[in-house]
Structure formats: structure tokens, C-alpha cells
Amino acid sequence: MNESTTLTLQPPALTKPVSKADFVSGQDVRWCPGCGDYAILAAVQKALADMQVQRQNTVFISGIGCSSRFPYYMNTYGFHSIHGRAPTLATGLKIARPELSIWVVTGDGDGLSIGGNHLIHTIRRNVDIKILLFNNQIYGLTKGQYSPTSEQGKKTKSTPFGTIDYPISPLCVALGVEGSFVARTTDTDLKHMAMVLERAAHHKGTAFVEIYQNCVIFNDGAFKGITEKSVRPDHALFLEHGKPMTFGKDGSKGIRLDGVHPNIVEATGKSEGLCVHDEKAPEPTLAYMLSRMRNPDYPVPFGVFRAIERPTYDGMLVAQEQQATAKMGAGNLQNLLRGPETWEVK
Amino acid sequence: MNESTTLTLQPPALTKPVSKADFVSGQDVRWCPGCGDYAILAAVQKALADMQVQRQNTVFISGIGCSSRFPYYMNTYGFHSIHGRAPTLATGLKIARPELSIWVVTGDGDGLSIGGNHLIHTIRRNVDIKILLFNNQIYGLTKGQYSPTSEQGKKTKSTPFGTIDYPISPLCVALGVEGSFVARTTDTDLKHMAMVLERAAHHKGTAFVEIYQNCVIFNDGAFKGITEKSVRPDHALFLEHGKPMTFGKDGSKGIRLDGVHPNIVEATGKSEGLCVHDEKAPEPTLAYMLSRMRNPDYPVPFGVFRAIERPTYDGMLVAQEQQATAKMGAGNLQNLLRGPETWEVK
Amino acid sequence: MSNPSTIQSAKKHQQLEKVAIRFAGDSGDGMQLVGGKFTETTAMCGNDFSTFPDFPAEIRAPTGSLPGVSGYQIHFSSRDIYTPGDAPDVLVAMNPAALKVNLRDLPENAILLVNQDAFNDANLKKAGYASNPLEDGSLKRFRFYPVPIGRLNAEALAKLGLPKKDAERCKNFFALGLIYWMFDRPMESTVTWIQDKFKKVKGIADANEAALKAGFFYGETTELIPEQYRIPQAQLEKGLYRKISGNEAAAIGFVAAAQLAGKQLFYGSYPITPASDILHELSYHKNLNVRTFQAEDEIAAMGATIGAAFGGSLALTGTSGPGVALKSEAIGLAVMTELPVVIVNVQRGGPSTGLPTKTEQADLFQAMFGRNGECPVIIVAPATPGECFHMAIEASRLALKFMSPVMYLSDGFLANSAEPWRMPKLEDLPRIHVEHPTVADNFLPYSRDPETLARPWALPGTPGLEHRIGGLEKEDGSGNVSYDSENHQHMVQTRAAKVAGVAKFIPPAAVAGPPHGDLLLVGWGGTYGSLRAASEEARRLGKSVAHLHLRYINPFPSNLGDLLTNYKRILVAELNCGQLLMMLRAKYLVDARGFNKVKGKPFQVVEVLRAIEEALL
Amino acid sequence: MSNPSTIQSAKKHQQLEKVAIRFAGDSGDGMQLVGGKFTETTAMCGNDFSTFPDFPAEIRAPTGSLPGVSGYQIHFSSRDIYTPGDAPDVLVAMNPAALKVNLRDLPENAILLVNQDAFNDANLKKAGYASNPLEDGSLKRFRFYPVPIGRLNAEALAKLGLPKKDAERCKNFFALGLIYWMFDRPMESTVTWIQDKFKKVKGIADANEAALKAGFFYGETTELIPEQYRIPQAQLEKGLYRKISGNEAAAIGFVAAAQLAGKQLFYGSYPITPASDILHELSYHKNLNVRTFQAEDEIAAMGATIGAAFGGSLALTGTSGPGVALKSEAIGLAVMTELPVVIVNVQRGGPSTGLPTKTEQADLFQAMFGRNGECPVIIVAPATPGECFHMAIEASRLALKFMSPVMYLSDGFLANSAEPWRMPKLEDLPRIHVEHPTVADNFLPYSRDPETLARPWALPGTPGLEHRIGGLEKEDGSGNVSYDSENHQHMVQTRAAKVAGVAKFIPPAAVAGPPHGDLLLVGWGGTYGSLRAASEEARRLGKSVAHLHLRYINPFPSNLGDLLTNYKRILVAELNCGQLLMMLRAKYLVDARGFNKVKGKPFQVVEVLRAIEEALL
Ligand SMILES: Cc1ncc(C[n+]2csc(CCOP(=O)(O)OP(=O)(O)O)c2C)c(N)n1
Ligand SMILES: Cc1ncc(C[n+]2csc(CCOP(=O)(O)OP(=O)(O)O)c2C)c(N)n1
Ligand code: SF4
Ligand code: SF4
Ligand SMILES: [Mg+2]
Ligand SMILES: [Mg+2]
């Protein structure tokens, strides 16, 4: 129905191979030294090169925020739009040009605060675009107010006594509207990022990826307790389809279900009875359960939570257009002007 | 922390008892004859009277849509605001006046299409307001375009060849952002509606209630297959806390879990092994699973999916204000003007 | 202007020049339907006509209530006609509420045809009548004909054995039949339509046909109504005609524009009265390279439209005033990124939710100024329903030529009003030339065409032209983000100059009437008909009055300033508090005065005439 | 105006009237900090001053890059001062990028103090210098002092044993010390601040102190810099002073207004540059009955503000232009429901995202006209940072008195610029009288105060006053939904009349300068300082020029039309393309001309002076 994405990922034989450097736009990168955005930029550029993506058929669209400067640094087509609205531009562009490969880059404020509605509607429609949400749990560009993902009690510029908002989980939100591809990765793990990005690129439909991203200036170390090498085994759970869910040093711990409730159990050696990850489960309940696991009670899951196939919005649109045209015949402007009824004045 | 809602529900001894008629504003009701909105209006007026709610402390706020005309017909304070924004007015009012009992009335278009973002942020903050979403799976007021809850393939004014959008489930969305009270009822069951409305009224925090509502003009019979007396037993599942989930004639069928997946089983007589409803489960996974059950594969659940207690936004706000004041002392305008540093010119 | 006195002393088959008929009843009474049928027949009879429906904001307010009244007016004539008529010469009132709501518009001696069976106590009460107006003599100043439509209709259908409710539903056709007789119109096309429409339920089809004929024969056989009128054919320009409303014309106009430009038409919209019909219409044309997107809100619709424009579509969005408010931030983005988008605003009564089903022209300021920063857009405004078609092509042409957002200001009156429209020949429509760069050498996304100042429209998919745009200020030429202060000033001026330069590519303004004179009546948009009729009437009365109607509002036609100096006085008539007026005064420093009305209704010809007369004192 | 020539032939302890110093360096170099410290010391020394920071849009662009340069200018004087100074008399440049970015503003003979250690190849390259400007003779036209600040600072701190990186971070204080010496300023208060600020890390505190002193002593002991200057105390009005920026003043002004009205202050906002600091400031004042709400977006912030106003708070929202665009639909709702809300727009460079950290006055049209329908709001605009306080009280007073939205137009310059502010005495501040109806008999939510046309503000919680409001047109009096056409016209006129009537309750406009004359210079909002200074200078040069500065823009003060007739020419100076200009021309039909600048920067006094001179030709 909609094979366009695949097409753009397979370069025609005659095109000369692209390298990571081909994706560097040459504009000065203006993030703070040490910002996690650099790692993500490098990972995206590398992943696209690895997949031999065609630059001219690729478009990066962002909103506003530090993260949203991303398109300037990609030597593809790009659109740095307005705060929260990137998914809407992406949807319009995809409808007009289904053959393009379209990526949305957004932040936790851009995507979940002002842009939350567009995000959920894009995901539910399953428009074939890839959404990367850089989650640094803070508003970076406006200099440090809390965001919808900031932990409760956080003291920020706008909450000197601590926030009282409950944080939102980007993945829960995506699953609340039946995201067909939902994943999480982190700026500190280039290999994992590459894997998730490639999976997202190949997914047909909306691919929603949350990327933990460190803001060195306003929220430094937000994910240290999860992603830093030394604590990672005990605090992160790496999901693999069809594999039992284990974590801890040498897979010493595992997740077992009690009803719909996940329990942590000892798991050394044996994996029986452990919950087996099924990213293809038609119902998203398991993915939803996983998306709610967080420190300190649970390890934080990384990887692909859900990846199911279902017709894309743009695919169905084109199909409907073709069916309608097949049925009614090609349209004719003169007939259109004529309308249902005419009369002649002589 | 926030006992305001309870207060307004308990009239002082001196007030004379209110009747359903007291809640009738006397303005001409302008819905189409036969519209489901009438039943909901009557149910709400009756429920408030039954709870002896004080009219002057009650505010109904709506957006735009047929459903959003609701406040005009309630003899309480009321605000018919603009499309999709009712939760924002309610939030501001609740922050300013936590002692008021505030109800939001919205539609599937008003609440989930243009207003989706405010809805999810209000729910996640757990602002102590009651949200009634009249779901008729259509845009009534604008004369029959599809809404975010319309079933796929629906032919409407704006989709003569059928919609290609996947519908959104209001309850999944509410659970995606951790709604503390999430329920569903229907305009065809006055008793059930009354029960759910009373539960919502007594909940401290955001109570989100989806009400199936029949639009006789543009989507007549949308829920007939679920809620009509004759088919109801087989197509609806009425949830009760602590009770096994059974449905069908004489409770002949039940829901049993296979992992996180619900299966329909024969259940006559015995209820062992059936999934027991737990609206108080700290994790919303079960409620999420239920919210995804739909015809024809499953019966559609009605009742309270989730009802947990957690501090409200307004409660925490007031508490923080009190703590800060206790710590810093009552503020002083002159000190504020003075600022951090002064000097004198003599 | 149709004047009731013209039909005052009518006899059998009296000939009239023009008549305005208003059908009024409950929302459920099918008044829009029979109005439409009468219009079609009128069209076939070769009259010029203009119609205007007036329906309630509620879908279906309680039966018999005042807010539930729905009306449809048709003005038809043997000569050119410009408006649906100030006041009806004939009013058909199907119930007390319809009578009450419409009576105040009815001039003395007008024909008043009433379904007397609906005047029972319950209905009288709902309409707030203390006594029955049919009996208390209050209708004496009209030529008043009470007809027991309910009973006659029931009797006529009795033999068909229909359920009572179904039979009752046909009474609108009874009324139509009676009016057909009164104006000596053929029933054939309506009968054909009925049989086709209800072909699946033969019983209903036959019942409606029977009701229609019963009404006709009732007129013919009873002596109750003494008069019958004939309105001869109009001398319309030769050609193939159809009936068209402004929304229909706009919709197909944009389809035509896309075809003329060899482009896909993208329409992103969120339903809103009175613009939704454009979405409905466009969503049918899947075989004409039209892609419609019902967005989650107006902001999304605007964002998607910008995305589609970036992708190379002729990208359009449509809404009404509140929706434009929501789009305004994103329109600014389209201005900054210099992408060709057209924004249709079918204006309605404001502010806020206002009067959603009523007409107004109060969003001109919003179109001009309703964005942050110096943010100019091109503004056009069609003047008649049919012109909605041509201005759609114009709006598209300008957007594509200048790589600029264009605001297209229609209104609730134009949207729903209908008139006969002579279909243009395809070959007469102007091709729209669009170019996309393909050569990578020295490509600069913000280089400019020296003539139009437009930047190149490089499309994703073109190898070597990869570039990035956005809402931050851009360096001219490269399009890179620039915080440079001189560049900012330069770009602000360039964007302004680009829009100002459009004046060189649009037709000069032209007046109807004397080239010099005492008064220039200035208007814009949907008020054309009333202003045109009033100014013609004024000239007929010997006044030195010309009429200037603006279709291009930003920029103004370049000869506008000069034209204004040719008249002693300038009267700017608008359905707002003086928006164009302010722009003219500020720009040309002329002491123009305003004639303003904000009642949710079009101008009446008589009131404009009166204003002209007062302005000439 | 400070002129470099005044310090040209300086000797030890030369006395000057005024000086402008600009500190410039990398975003990470702490220029805002030392600028602020210098300002505090200047305040203690009794000078009048005005400051303006100029920081990059990026949080921290790459070290050493041009977009990463951050600047802070202070203009201080022994006399009244109005602006932060057109051009610096002294520039401190901490690296090549800072030099490059600021050099074009530096007049000949100005003092240029450079950290020569930062001029290595890497940094030169980042700044795009082909050759080292310190060595190629290009700086000869300045009084140029290269100082090895990096090395000197390192040496001074060597004995403290700090990590190299930490020591290096102190070099801004070295520079500050040197400037303190140069202008003969005491170091005590800065030393106290340092020790307090870093009291938890004694090593850092001592290092910064040592750096500061080293800089001072370097100036004192070396012969490198021959001059030292003294700027005597200014003759300021007696009283207690503090330093205040526009955003600070606005924030505490609204707190004060709420207290004066006996109301809770509600502030609903979504962060946006340059308005966020108001949110930050207000969120502290939990013990002053202030409730802040960081909403999910600007629409939610506006909605919540309306909700809070309905509940009886003094309800405020704040944002910048793009945020106002988003709020515009809901502002219309506030107009229709006639609720008292204040909308603060701290204007920034537009259109679209534009130049977020730069100043501009291009949102006046948006404030006036940026909504659907006829939708008038009251508009006020503070003229100086300190006045942001008083206009906050005024805005609140008008909103509450007239039950109307009020737009408060600040800008990026006012927001961040600081000046000494004489604290008002509490008892001098005007109480704001607010009444809420409590009697149920004959209560009508849209009845009107005959004097102000305000409707009553009945609060939820009041028994018997239950009522319902909304965005549909309302019947006057009852407030019920009304589709009646006469009522609509009446309500549109009433809302307009209400806002127009505000003119009776605001002070008349007053000019500075001759009451009649050759030229009237008109401005509004944050440009006051430059216009005031330029017009004073023009009068000093013998020109017949008066200055009129508007704080009330809608409605205009009632004497404005008359005032305009007293001058031969009118020049309207604005940081936009002529928005107030257009309003004045349209309303008063005067041939006013515009002096306009849209560069993201305030007016320079010299350029206004030049414009005045040209206008007089
Ligand atoms: C309409 C509008 N409102 C507010 C802003 C100000 N703003 C810019 S970015 C931003 C939030 C950025 O946070 P996030 O999306 O998390 O991105 P980050 O900077 O953290 O990468 C805000 C509030 C804006 N540019 N436009
Ligand atoms: C900003 C704005 N956009 C669009 C509209 C038009 N509009 C009014 S109600 C509505 C949808 C109503 O659907 P729903 O919320 O489901 O309510 P229902 O009428 O079905 O009860 C729309 C699109 C509007 N009033 N304002
Ligand atoms: S502020 Fe934070 S998110 Fe933004 S560029 Fe700097 S480190 Fe990165
Ligand atoms: S259109 Fe539908 S939802 Fe609206 S009032 Fe009529 S029946 Fe009810
Ligand atoms: Mg962020
Ligand atoms: Mg609905």
C-alpha cells in the first residue's frame, strides 16, 4: 500500500554511496559544549549513511527548542518550524509527497507540552513519519523551566519551591493512542541508538522514539542513575523481541508477571516463567506495562516496546484515491465546473 | 490536603434541601428532539440534587459543540467557552478558587480533537475537576463531520469515501496520562449514569467520565449494538470493584487473563480464575487493558475503570503556598518593592 | 430593488419584473429544500436570481421555537439582479414561530401565505404569541392568505396510506406547489428530482409528488388566491449556466487553479461554520488530484498546509475568524519561509464565537494585522458568489507567483448565497506558470526574482538543492539564520516590498458610474450586490454617485489613490465598524466617511441608498 | 549623550559627566555578572545609570564563536540619564569574537581594553579573523590597551592552588577590578557579594576576590593605562533607590496592584523569551497571595487566566508576540465575556520566531487588531523600566474598573534594561476599588455601570447570582445568548464605547518641550529614553521640538488630537514600520511622518537627532 519509505532507503544502483560526512550540513553547530544533542546528531547521521539513505528524499522537520535546531545540521531538506507544530507540517508534507522520508525532531516541551495534541493525533493516524523526541526533562532553550517530563518536586526557574505537576511518560502517551512503533534509547549508548534509529527508519507508519538526552546546563545528570555504565545493569532493562526480560549483572534479575503486574525476581541461569518480550503483540497492553516501569521500583526499559504493522494514513489515502479514481474515472475539470445541473441561455 | 470538594458536597445544616428542579436554569433547551444530551442533563441535575450540592458553589464549564451548550441549562454558575479550551478555564478557576466544585462538559471533538492537549495535561496534573465527555462519535454542531472517535471507514460529510483515521479511545488516552479516576457510562442507562456521576463527584482529583451519547441526527444508533437492552448482556461488561468480570445472560461468560491478554471464557456458576476488577490498583495496566476491549471481539466495559487517591494539583498548590508562607512569613509589599539591594539618596 | 407596490394591484397573470419570496418554517420543515427546488426551476425558466438561506445556529432547536426557524429567500427577475432582496414580497410561514421571526421584515401589502393548521395553542405558546395573530387582525396590512396546508396535505395523501408522520413531512412540497402555481412555474423538473431522490422508497416519492401537485391544483382551483404572476426570462449573456453558491465556487475555483498550475491541490482544514462546505466539496474530488486533510484543529490544518506547500502542492486552508486567530502564529511562519499558501476566511459574526451562522466583514483587520511582527500578506476578496471562483484562481496565481501567503476573504453571505453562473470555457481560464529550480550550482533558497522578489521554490526530492528554512530571521540570499541587525531591517523591508509590488500585477480599480462626481461609494467583498444596486438606483434618481468595489485589498490597486481624488465625498460601506475605512484614511489621508452595519446581515439596498442620500446632503 | 571626545585628553582623575562601558565576552565568560556588579557599585556611588544586556539566542553557542558573544552595557552619569548609551566609550573585549562583534559600534578614540591572551590562532579562526587585529594596526584609531588578563589572572591565583579551569573562570573579575580602578570605584560591596555567593566553596570565593583585587592593583601599579576617571554623584531625587529592570518592575507592579485591590494575583503563562522572567519572579511570591500556573501552552495560559478572572482574581497572563498570536482567539472570549484580564506582551523581533532575544515594537497592530470580529481591548505601554511598575498598576486598575481585557505592551529592551528606581511609598500608591454584587434581586450579569459601561462582576460562590456567560453574542442586560440583529449592533457598539470611554479616566497626554512649535516627536513604549534624550538635545541646539510619549494607546488620551494641531510637523518614531503612525493618520487625518527602524535594537540618540533634523528641513 505504501512502499515509499522502503524505496527511499534503497538507493538506486547508479547513485554513489553516501557517507556520514555527506549528512553534515556545514552550518556551525550551536549547542552547549557537552550537550547530549551532539551524540544524537552523530548517531542519526551515521545511521542514515549506514542505510544509504538518499539525502534529497529526506526531510527533517522540527519545532522550537535546543533540540529543534537539529535540521540545520543535517544536509538534507529541513524545516525549523514553530513551537510544537512539527508533526503538523510533517503530516501535510507526507500527504502531499508520500514518497519522501520524513523525520520529526522534537523536545519534551515542544512535543509533549505545547505540541502534545499534534503528537497524539499524528501517532494515532499512523502517518508514516519518524518522530525523535529528545527528552532532557527540562526546557533548555528558554533557560531552565520544568517540562512535562520533569520529576515532581523539581526546583526550576519557574518552580522555586518544586514542581507539583505529575510527569508524563512519553511512551505511555504514545501507547494511549496506539502507536504502531514505540521505542526508547539514550544519547549515551551510540550502538543502541543506531539500532533503534534503523528500526524506526524501516518501520512503515509513525515511529515514535524517546531519546534520553542530557542537558549539561540546566539538568545535568538527569539520567546518570539509569544510563551510566556502572549503574546501568541494575537500572536499565534492554528489551529484545522474543527474549525473556532479564537485567542486572549477568542477567541475574528478571521480570515475572503476577496478573498484569510485573515483579522483579532472581533469574540467574534460568529464564522460565520470566516475561518474554513481544513487540509484535497486537494489543499494546504489555508495551504499556513496560512503559510504566521506572526507577527506583523497576529498571527502565530501553529498546523497541512495540512494532506492529498496520496500514499507514498516507498509504490508505493514496489507495482510496486510486480506488475512487478507478471507480469514477479520471476527473475532468469541465465536468466539475458544470456541477449537478445546468441550463443554457441562447 | 484538599478537602474542598467534599465541603461543597455537604450542605451546611441551615441550607434548605435542593431538588432536581433547582438545577434547571429555565433557558430553553435547544437540542434536537431525541438527542441523548437530554438524558445526560436530567441525570446530572438529579445526581447533584441527590447529593445536595450547593448550586452557588458549582460551576459548569464547556467548550463548543452541541454538548457544550450544557451549562446554559444548569442553574449553577456556568461558562460556555471556546472550542476545546474548557479544561484550561476550569484549571485557572480551580487554582484561584479551590473550594468550588467544577465540572467540565465536552464532546468527542471538543475534548479529543482540538482540545486533546488540555485534556491530557489537566488529567495528568490531577486538577480536582470533573470532566464529562459526551461521545457521540461525530461532530454534531457543525453538522456531521467525523470525529476522533468515529470508526474507521465511516462516511461523513468530510469523508464521502470513508475515514482513514484510526479512532482514539478516550479512556486509553486518559490512562496514557495516568488518570486517577476513569469511567464510562451511557445515556441509555440512567441508573448507571447516576452511579458513575456520584462516584465522579466524590472523587478527589480529575474525574474523567466518557458518556456514550446518541446523536439522532448525524450518527443515530451508534451504540445500539452495545447498549440496547436486548444485546446489552452480550456486548457490555459492567465493572464492579472486587468482583470477577462476568457478562452475558446470567453472567454466563467471563474474562480470564492469559498473560496480559484477556480471554473470554464460559463462566456459568463458577467465578474462579476469572479476572477480578480492581479499580484501586496502583498501576493502571488493568484499567488500560479494559479500556482497549471493544466490540466485536470483546464486550465493552462500563463503570469505574480506575479510582485511586493521590494528591490533587490544587491541593498541593495550596499546601505549598502554606508551607512557603510558614517558612518565609507572610509577605510584605514594602519588602517586595525594596528588592535585594537598595541605596539611599539624601 | 423589488418593491411590493409593483405587485399591489395584481390580477391573473400579471407580469412582474422581479419578486422576492421567503420560505420560512421550522428547521425540520424542509424550507431549504423547497427553496432550492424553486431556485432550480427559476433558473430553468431563465430568470436571473439571487438566493440566501438563513438558518439557525442550532442543528434543530425545539420544534416550533423561535430559534428553530429556518428561512430561504429567493429574489428573481427578468433583469440583472444583484441581491437576494431587501425584504420579501411573498412570505410563506409554516408555523407561528416562522411568522413571528419574519414578520418584521415584511413590507405592507406583501403577500403572506400561512399554514393556518400550525397555529394551535401549543405552537402559539412556543412562539410567544398571547393571541392568535391569524385572528386578532394584526395581519391586515398584508395581503394575507391563511391556508390549511396541514389538513389539505393530509387529505391529498390519504389514499396513499402513509404513516401520518411521513405524510405530514410532505407539507413543504404542498407549499411549494402552491407557490409554483402562483408564479406560473413548471413542476416537471421537481417531480423528476423527487422520483429520483426517493427512488428507493417509492411511497415517499409518490407522496411528495402528490403533495406538490395538490398544492399547485389548490391554487389553480380555489378562488382564495386571486393573483398569478409571470416573471419573463432575463436577458442573460449567452452560455451554459449553473446555480452556484460562494462556497461551491471557491472550492471548484481552487481545484481549477491547481489544474491550471499543473499542481496537486492540498486542502487542510478543521470544520467550522460557515466554511465547512468547502471541505465537504473538496473531499469528493479524489479523482482530480485533490488531497483533503481534516486536521485535529486549525493550527494543525495551517501547519499541514505549510508542509504541503514546502512539498510543492498548491496548498490551501480554510476556516472562519476564530480559526484564523488560531492559525495566526503559523501564518507568520509562512510569511517568514515565503511559501505559497492560501488561507480562506469565510467570515462570520464576531467577536469570539459571536454569531456563527451570520455574515460580517469584521476580519479585515485580522487579515491585515493579526500577527506578531511586521508580517504582510496579500489579501483578496471576491465580490459575488460566482466571483468566488475567479478570485480563487487569482489568489492561487498570486501565492504561486510571489511565494507568499494570500488571505482570501469570503463571508457567510457569499458562502451560502447562490446565483446563476455562466460557466467559463476551460480555454479561457489563465494557465498558471510555476517553476522549480533543479540546478544545484549557486543555488540560494532566498535569492530573489528581480521582478517579483519571489524566492525560488526548490522541492524536496531535487538532488543538490537540499536546504533548510524556518521561522527565525533569515539572511537574504542564503536563507541562513541571521541575527544581524542590518539584515533584519533589509528583510522586513523586502517582505513588505514584495507584497507591495503585487500592485503591478493586478488590474487597476475601476468605478461603475461617473469618473468624477459628488460621491464615491467604496466597498469590498460580499457587499457588492447591495452597493451596486443602491448606486445604480441613486444614479437613476439623478445623483452623481459612482461605485468602487475592491477585490484586492493588500496591496491596493495602484490607481486607487488617484481615483479617490475624483469625488467630492467618499463613503465606505462595510459590515464592520470601519476597517477598510481606516486603511484608506491612513494611507491616502482622505476624509472618507463610513457607512457601517454590524447586524449579522447583508446590507439592504434601501439602507445603502439612504446612506448615499445622507452623504450627499 | 556621552561622547568619546570628552575623555580624549584625560589625565589622572579626570572628571567626566557620563560614560558608557560595554563588557563583552563569550557566553561562558560571565559578562552579565560583572556588568551587574559594576552597576550595583555605580548605584551605590550615586550615579544615575541605565543598563542593557545583549545576549545570544543560543544558550551557549560554541566557545569563541561569533554567535556566542554576550555583552552588557552600562551608561552612568552625574546627571539624568535616559538610555544605556548609543555607543560605548569603553569596550572590554575578552576574546576575538567579542572584539569583532562589538568593534563596529565603537567610536574613534574610545578606550578599548582587550584580553590579549585570548587572541590565539584557534580563537582568531573561530572569530573569522585572517590576521591578528591586535598586531595588524587595525585598532589604531582607538585608545587601545591590550592586557594579558589570562596570564595575569593565573599568576595572581597561582598560590591558591585551584584547578586551572576554576582559576581561569575568575578572569572576568580581574577585568572588573581593572575597570573599577579606571573609574575609581570601591570594591567593598563586590567583595562582600563574592564571599556571600560562594560561601560554600571558600576556595572559589577567595579566588574571585583575589582576581578582582589583582585587576584593580594592576591598574594602579602599572603605567600601562594612564587615565583614571571620576564621575561625580548625580542629583537624584531624595529617597530609597533600587536597581530595577522592566520585567522585575512589571512583576512586582502586578503584585502591588493585586494587593492594592485586595485581590489574589493569578499569573498563567508559558515560558517564552523575553517574558519568562516575569513568571520566574512571580513564582517566588507564594506568601503574597500570588498563584502562578505554568501552562502547557499559551492558549491554556490564556484560558486559565480567563477562568481565574471569572473566579475573582486579578488575572494576568504574559508572553511575547508568537504567544499573543496563539492567545488571540481566547482574548476574544475575554472581550465577549467582559472579564478583567491583563495580557502582557514583552515584544521581540518578528515576524514568526524572528529574533527572539532582540527588541521591537511591531506587535501594536496585533494588540489593536489581531482578533476576529470587532474586538476592542484597552492598550497601555510603559515607557521606562521603572514605569513598568506603575503601568502594571494602571493596567490592573483599568481592567478591573472597566471589566475589560487590557494589553500591556512592554518590549525586550524594557524587559532587560535596568535603571535606578526610587521606591514608591506604599501609602502613595492608589487603592483599587473593586465591588462584587451580592444581592440576587434583579441581578443581570450584563447590566451596566452608567459611567464606565462595565458589567457587574458576580463571583461563583455567591448565592442567588448563578449565571452563565460565554462566547456567543449576548443580550445586553440578561447576558443570554442572542442572535438578534439589533442587539448585535448594540453590543458591538457598547463594547467599543466602553473602551473608548476609558479616555475619560486616564491622564491627558503631555508634551515635553514647547507647547507649540515646528515639530512634535511622537513615540510610545520603550523608546522613551532615546526620544527624550534626542529631543532635549535638539532643543539644546535651538530647535523648536517637543516630545510626546504615549503610555495609553487605546483609547488615545482625549486631548491628543488637539495637541497634534499645535505643531507644524509630526514625526512618529517607532521600532516598526509605522504602526502608531497609521493609527494617528487614520484617526486625526494629520500628515504625520514615520521614523522607523526594525533592527532588533533600540533607537540610538544620534539617529533620532538626525531624523529630527531631517524632518525640520
Ligand atoms: C509559541 C511559543 N511559545 C513559547 C516559545 C518559547 N520556547 C522556545 S523552546 C521552548 C521549550 C523548549 O523545551 P524543549 O522542547 O524540551 O526543548 P529543549 O530546549 O529542552 O531541547 C519554549 C517554551 C516559543 N518559541 N514559541
Ligand atoms: C476554533 C473553532 N474551530 C471550529 C469550530 C467549529 N466547531 C464547533 S463545535 C465543533 C465540533 C463539535 O463536535 P463535538 O465536540 O463532538 O460536539 P457535539 O456537537 O458532537 O456534541 C466544531 C468543529 C469552532 N467553534 N471553533
Ligand atoms: S541548554 Fe541544555 S539542551 Fe540546550 S544546548 Fe545547552 S546543554 Fe543542550
Ligand atoms: S445534532 Fe446530534 S448531538 Fe447535536 S443536538 Fe442534534 S442530536 Fe444532539
Ligand atoms: Mg527539553
Ligand atoms: Mg460529538
Image (cartoon, coloured by chain):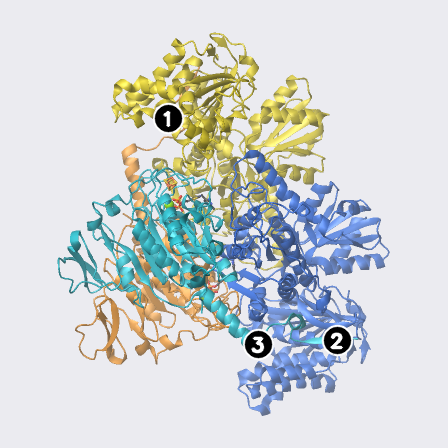
Chain colours: A orange, B cyan, C yellow, D blue
The quarter holding residue D565 reads top right
Q: Amino acid at mark 2?
A: Glu
The chain that hosts pointer 1 is A
Q: Amino acid at mark 3?
A: Met
Secondary structure at numbered mark 1: loop
Dot 1 corresponds to which residue?
Answer: A340
The chain that hosts pointer 3 is B
- Residue C74: % across, % down: 48, 23
Picture quarter with ligand 4: top left
Residue at image location 51% in from the left, 74% down from the top: B323
- In this rendering, the label closer to the viewer, 3 or 1: 3
Is there a contact, CB below 8 Å, between mark 1 and mark 2? no
Q: CA distance from mark 3 to mark 1?
A: 76 Å
Is there a contact, CB below 8 Å, between mark 3 and mark 1? no
Q: Nearer the viewer, residue C170 or C437?
A: C170
Dot 2 corresponds to which residue?
Answer: B344
Q: Can I make out residue A171 in this image?
A: yes
Which residue is most to the top?
A: C12
Q: Is residue C482 left or right of residue A290?
A: right
Q: Amino acid at mark 1?
A: Pro
Is there a contact, CB below 8 Å, between mark 3 and mark 2? no
Which residue is most to the bottom?
A: D159
Please, is residue A217 above or below residue D187 in the view?
A: above
The chain that hosts pointer 2 is B
Q: Is residue B310 left or right of residue D519?
A: left
Dot 3 corresponds to which residue?
Answer: B328
Q: Nearer the viewer, residue D139 or C22?
A: C22
Q: Can I make out residue D272 in this image?
A: no
